[in-house]
Image: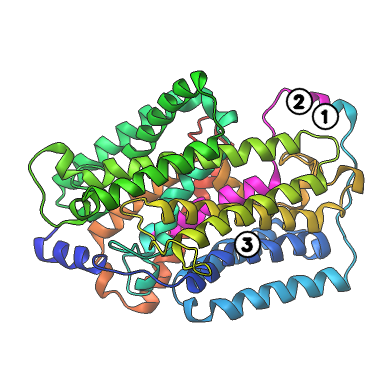
């Protein structure tokens, strides 16, 4: 890559301050409202979607194109877009009867599925939408059509892209009881890809935002480091048992005290770097502590919710449990980041430091997301099952297949593989195309083509036996 062009690319994503909470929340709601309308169409207007080509096209336009538009050309109109999608869904729900037939899960099928991993629809939609949105954003951010307020903030602030790394870690912790056996394999592949990424960037003179993680560090090193740190914590808690949430809060509060009393914060945010490995990668190394806290919170939330999911009368219990978790972490975030009636700490969010406000923001957003996706699942559950089995569906039952988003589920089931492919495509596009000077129409055309390729990749890996979870 030409040195002058590289400098322009780095300046394009540097020294940004993010957006406000309302703007970011509106964009994050776009995948959710799009899935609400799609699942409503599946249950109320399935006769219109009998042709596979029509069904796939409509689903792509709603579940992929709408979020992509929210990230780019439709950004100024996202609040109106979300309201329109919700109103359309409500109109269909109130005016049409369910057109999806179903049957209750038989005892034999339940026994057959008992030995397999259970994939609950609201979790599949949450993880899949997160992965899809992240894959779209990592390329879109390099174009002028992507609002700078959605790109990563330099030191302080919140944005859509600031959320992804923390959300991956939270989501990984949430389902960790199901994927612990693959932790070593996943860490190996992530470390290997991180090394390959580092080598390729140096070889190709690729743009690098060093204040994000450091000179050599990147997200693919952070996740294995978090896994190792959590394993150490688990060894300690064998002797002194403590809830995951308590450990997380204690860890991040201690980290915040060190930042503010030891001069560590000024050192981490300083432009001056030494020559040692730790100094060159201080942001990535220190933020691992915050990400470990996020993982522990996700694991704690997951343990509570999966315990409720295993109970006999779980519909209202799970809904209440998710509402409690969402309220708890949203309240903690408000306490940490605002004045909160004179009691708050007023600590600004910093993804670079993974400070207490960032950790609690990630926990709050993902807890609210899970609660809302569960509500969407509940809207359509009675279309295929009796009230006695509400929310007891797995993602592989016949009834669930009638109302789920196949594209979003594919992004979830493809796992980390689709994200790795997205990174490779992003690198190739940035090397081959001048994204900064591309016209608005050309940018949108390229991004839509990219989204179509990613969707095809997700479906390919979904059907493959080789999957790598994040």
Which quadrant would residue 78 be assigned to in this image? Answer: bottom right
Which residue does the image show at 53% across and 70% down from the upper left? Answer: 341
Residue 119 visible here: no
Is 170 above or below relative to 34?
above
Q: Which span of residues is magenta-colored?
A: 111-137
Q: Quadrant of the N terminus?
A: bottom left
Q: Is-magenta flag for residue 410?
A: no
Sequence-wise first label, 3 or 2 = 3
Residue bearing the label numbered 3: 32
Q: Residues within 10 Å of mark 3 (few under 14, many from 20)?
A: many
Q: Are marks 2 and 1 in contact (CB under 8 Å)?
A: yes
Q: Main secondary structure of the magenta part?
A: helix
Residue bearing the label numbered 2: 114
Q: Residues within 10 Å of mark 2 (few under 14, many from 20)?
A: few
Residue bearing the label numbered 1: 110
Q: Position of residue 276 (x, y in %)?
A: 10, 38
Which residue does the image show at 77% across and 46% down from the upper left? Answer: 400
Sequence-wise first label, 1 or 3 = 3
Instruction: Give the Cα distance between marks 1 and 3.
Output: 29 Å
Q: Position of residue 62 (x, y in %)?
A: 62, 66
Is 249 above or below relative to 58?
above
Which residue does the image show at 15% across and 45% down from the upper left? Answer: 202
Instruction: Give the Cα distance between marks 3 and 2.
Output: 29 Å
Residue 430 visible here: yes
Instruction: Give the Cα distance between marks 2 and 1.
Output: 6 Å
Q: Position of residue 168 (x, y in %)?
A: 47, 46
Which quadrant would residue 302 be assigned to in this image? Answer: top right
Say whether residue 428 is left or right of residue 199. Answer: right
């Amino acid at each position: 890559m030409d040195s002058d062009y590289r400098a322009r690319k780095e300046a394009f994503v540097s020294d940004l301050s993010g957006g406000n909470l309302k703007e970011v929340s509106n964009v994050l709601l776009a995948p959710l409202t799009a899935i609400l309308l799609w699942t409503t169409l599946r249950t109320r207007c399935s006769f219109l979607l009998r042709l596979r080509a029509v069904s796939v096209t409509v689903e792509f336009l709603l579940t992929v194109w709408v979020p992509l538009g929210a990230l780019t050309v439709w950004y100024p109109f996202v609040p109106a877009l979300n309201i329109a999608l919700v109103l359309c869904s409500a109109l269909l729900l109130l005016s049409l009867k369910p057109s999806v037939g179903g049957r209750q899960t038989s005892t034999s099928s339940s026994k057959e599925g008992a030995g397999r991993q259970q994939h609950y629809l609201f979790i599949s939609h949450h993880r899949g939408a997160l992965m899809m949105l992240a894959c779209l954003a990592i390329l879109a951010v390099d174009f002028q059509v992507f609002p700078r307020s959605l790109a990563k903030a330099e030191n302080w602030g919140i944005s859509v892209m600031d959320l992804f790394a923390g959300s991956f870690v939270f989501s990984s912790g949430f389902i960790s009881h199901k994927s612990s056996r693959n932790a070593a394999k996943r860490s190996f592949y992530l470390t290997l890809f991180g090394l390959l990424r580092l080598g390729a960037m140096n070889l190709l003179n690729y743009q690098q935002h060093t204040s994000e993680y450091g000179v050599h560090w990147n997200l693919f090193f952070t996740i294995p480091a978090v896994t190792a740190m959590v394993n150490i914590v688990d060894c300690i808690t064998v002797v002194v048992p403590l809830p995951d949430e308590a450990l997380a809060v204690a860890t991040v509060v201690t980290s915040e005290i060190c930042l503010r009393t030891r001069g560590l914060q000024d050192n981490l945010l300083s432009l001056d770097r030494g020559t040692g490995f730790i100094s060159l990668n201080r942001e990535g190394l220190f933020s691992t502590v915050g990400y470990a806290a996020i993982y522990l919170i996700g694991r704690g939330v997951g343990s509570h919710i999966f315990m409720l999911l295993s109970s006999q009368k779980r519909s209202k219990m799970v809904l209440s449990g998710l509402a409690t978790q969402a309220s708890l972490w949203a309240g903690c975030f408000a306490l940490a980041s605002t004045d909160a009636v004179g009691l708050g700490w007023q600590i600004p969010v910093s993804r670079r430091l993974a400070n207490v406000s960032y950790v609690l923001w990630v926990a709050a957003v993902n807890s609210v997301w899970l609660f809302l996706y569960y509500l969407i699942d509940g809207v359509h559950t009675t279309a295929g099952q009796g009230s006695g089995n509400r929310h007891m569906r797995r993602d592989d039952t016949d009834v669930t297949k009638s109302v789920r988003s196949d594209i979003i589920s594919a992004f979830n089931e493809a796992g980390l593989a689709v994200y790795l492919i997205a990174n490779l495509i992003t690198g190739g596009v940035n090397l081959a195309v001048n994204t900064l000077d591309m016209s608005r129409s050309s940018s949108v055309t390229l991004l839509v083509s990219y989204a179509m390729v990613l969707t095809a990749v997700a479906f390919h890996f979904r059907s493959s036996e080789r999957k790598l979870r994040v």
